Each structure stands twice: as C-alpha cells, then as structure tokens.
Image (cartoon, rainbow, N blue to C red):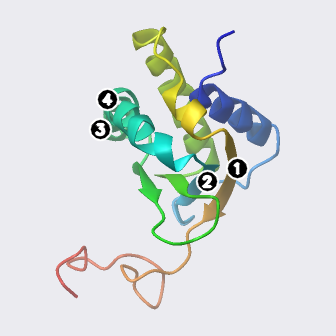
Amino acid sequence: MRKVPPILCLILVAVFAAARPAAAQDEDTPPTLRISMFQCHWDKVGDAMDQFEEITLPVWNELVDEGMIIDAGTFIHAWADEWNVGIYTVATSIQAVLDFTAEAGRRIEERHPDAPNTFGEACPRHRDGFYVLGPSTGMDDDDGDVEEGDEGEGS
C-alpha cells in the first residue's frame, strides 16, 4: 500500500483552510506566515531532509522566482518539544500560500510520481498555523513599512 505523500496532506489542509473566508488582502496588509510543525523520528530526519533538498526545494525555488510566494524553507529545533521539524512559508496572503502549496504539489507529483514518501515516513504527524506578520526590525516605527536603505544594511 502506497502512503499519501506529505505534500498531498498539506494540500488537503490548504483546501480545508480555503473553505474558510479569509480577510481581504490589500497593499497595506502585512505578509502571511504559515508554520507547519512535524513530529519526526530523529533517526530518519537526515534522509527526509536529503529528499526534501533534492525534490521539493528546487520546485519551491522556482515558485519564489516566479513571485508566487516571498520565501519558504525548513528549520529543525535545537531544543524544544516533540514537534521537532518545521516548514515555513511567507507570502502576501493566505490564498497565496494555498495556491503555492497546490502548485508545488502538482509539480512535484508530475516530476517525481514514483518517489518514496521519505518525509512522511520520517515525520508522521503535523499541524499547521497561519499568522499575519507583525512589527519587525525591518519596519519603520510610524507606519510599519520598510524604510528605503534599511533593507539589511547592518542597522
């Protein structure tokens, strides 16, 4: 029996989230952050991350280059709880995250239909959260916009 790839699980979560009304997005709305946390078996994380870098990350890079999302990547905690591997996505809206997830899943399945579900086997449980980014170090104190010249110049 073939297991459901984790990307398809993310697509199902995205479809569920899309069924809920999202706030209208305009140019003054801060970006959306999706955090997907996974409970992974430590002895399998290395193989899962190798497959992620080989198969998933190139597709995500294409979608960033195409402007579908702002950024996406992974993180592994050094010390926390049992939710030990994370995936983040930053986009202009919840809908952009959902569209990215669907398109990434489509491209990955099209290019690698017989790839084993290494990530799903290593990380059998996950949960998602969607957040609107708040004030950050790159924002002006008055209006929340990044000031020209403040884009990472050691300020």
Using the image, determine if residue 149 lies above or below residue 106. Answer: below
Percent across and percent down for residue 107 are: 45, 19
Q: Nearer the viewer, mark 3 or mark 2?
A: 2
Using the image, determine if residue 66 lies above or below residue 39. Answer: above
**Crowding at label 2, few (<14), some or many (≥20) Cα neighbours within 10 Å?**
many
Mark closer to the chain start, 2 or 1: 2
User: Which label number is shown at residue 127?
Assistant: 1
Label 2 sits on what residue type?
Met
Task: Report the residue marked by disc 3.
Answer: 65
Quarter of the image for residue 19 reads top right
Mark closer to the chain start, 4 or 2: 2
Mark closer to the chain start, 4 or 3: 4
Kindly tell me whether residue 119 is visible in this rendering. Answer: yes
Mark closer to the chain start, 1 or 4: 4
Task: Report the residue marked by disc 2.
Answer: 37
**Point 45% across, 20% down: residue:** 108
Percent across and percent down for residue 6 are: 60, 31
140 to the left or right of 3: left
**Crowding at label 3, few (<14), some or many (≥20) Cα neighbours within 10 Å?**
few
**Point 39% across, 83% down: residue:** 137
**Point 68% across, 46% down: residue:** 126
Distance in Å between CA atoms under marks 3 and 1: 27 Å
Label 4 sits on what residue type?
Glu
Distance in Å between CA atoms under marks 4 and 2: 20 Å
The C terminus lies in which quarter of the figure? Answer: bottom left
